[in-house]
Image (spheres, rainbow, N blue to C red):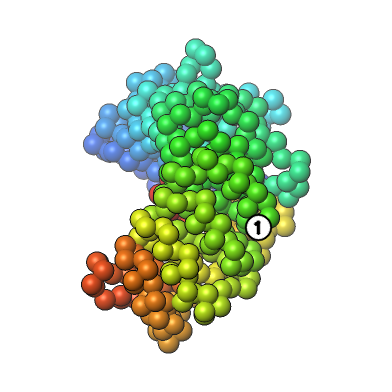
Amino acid sequence: QVKDVYQPRFIADATLYNTLLTQVTSFTSLRQLVCRGMLLPNNFHSIVHSFPLLRDLAIVHCTLPFVRPLDFDHTSLKIESLTLLDIRYAVPPRPDDNDIPRTALRRLATAPTLRTLTCDYTVWVHRVFTISTPCPPLTALDVKFPFQKDRDRARVPHGFIPFLETLPSLRTLILRNHVPALPLLPNALPALRSLSAPFSAIPSICSGRRINQLDIRDEAVLAPLYKAFEVVHSHLSLVQELSLFLGDWDDEVILAIVAHFPSLTKLQVRYARGGPSEDTILGMGSRTLHTLTHLVSAHIFHIDLSPRPQNLLQVEANNQDDDTAYGAPGIDDTYFQSMHDIEPATEAQIAWNRACPALRNVQLHAGWVWRRADPVDSWVARPCEWGIWGDVFGSTIDA
């Protein structure tokens, strides 16, 4: 067993490991393959090609082999979804990042049937695409950027913006951790409809594009947020689903949302400090939300923040992203409220019934959601099984 600086956990028994590798190729009907926390075998690429029905391939927290891989032509693969996260070396890679094993792994993304790609900064898959090796017609891209302690020094990796500009069919884009502004060409990403990104990248991506689903991943500071709403106002009118996190509650935020997002069907606002008064909650339907005539889901609730990671080692140790510190802890029993605690929500639903007849889902506490089937149905409180980030639109990443 060889361990790198990330201390990966390999299979404890070499005989079992070799037996597994020998037998796995007999699963010729395999449609999904997930390699997690393992030392990839020397013949890994050959194994992948032994599954003619393989459609979903994920390689997560894995260590690359020491040997030079054979030069496989992955254009014969039929995979539709590829995940490459936390790719490691038992020894540090060469500084020019032209190492052959990692480049061979990137080439898995050249499969012409690929539509969903999830990757991170340990592999930067976009570097494999050139004029002679174009990217397949992706419809969903999920990219995890490195943790940034000093955000002012953050840079977009070389070639990433030109790569985005070659994706005319991309409909969903998720950018994790801090990302600087992305000055895209005006005609780039014409099919983009769903965007989840830090606030710093939102204005540059939204401008000129018909975004339907918008998720602002990190903490939205109110003054810049309102200014950004004004700048891209003409491009926000088609947004139907909005999710954002506020560090400090401000009653004005609902007014700003109503003014700039008239087509909303789903709204999620999380906050960490302060909060609306009971009178504000009871009057929210008749004073503001009633203008959103298509609104079916309103989630406005307080969450407790996890401590923000101070350095890269802490991020790795906690398996935590930079932006999860801005209001995205996992939902578990500690976030459930007692039925007594959520009784005031009933009053809010009653107060909102006449003003917002289309409402079907209301969440005013983390962990609980009130639902009804139609305007004459009774509101019923149920435990909320959704993760905080997954409420607005689906997530493809697993990290």
Q: Nearer the viewer, residue 268 or 80?
A: 268
Write down the quadrant of residue 368 in the picture.
bottom left
- Residue at 32% of width from left, 35% of height from top? 55
Q: Is residue 88 left or right of residue 170?
A: right
- Residue at 30% of width from left, 75% of height from top? 379
Residue 96 location, x and y as percent? 69, 25
Type of amino acid at the residue the image marks with label 1: Leu
Q: Which class describes the residues within 10 Å of circle 1: few (<14), some (14-19), or many (20+)? A: some
Say if 120 sits above or below 357 in the image: above
Say if 360 sits above or below 281 in the image: above
* Residue 50, visible in the rendered structure: no
Residue 189 location, x and y as percent? 48, 29
Write down the quadrant of residue 375 in the picture.
bottom left
Q: Nearer the viewer, residue 371 or 394?
A: 371
Residue 169 location, x and y as percent? 41, 28
| Count of marks overlaid on the render | 1
The residue identified by callout 1 is: 222
- Residue at 52% of width from left, 80% of height from top? 278
In terms of secondary structure, where does tag 1 sit? helix
- Residue at 62% of width from left, 73% of height from top? 274
Say if 69 sits above or below 268 in the image: above
Q: Nearer the viewer, residue 21 or 251?
A: 251
Say if 80 sits above or below 309 in the image: above
Residue furthest to the top in view is 132
* Residue 341, visible in the rendered structure: yes
Residue 266 location, x and y as percent? 41, 56
Q: Is residue 264 left or right of residue 103?
A: left
Quarter occupied by the N terminus: top right
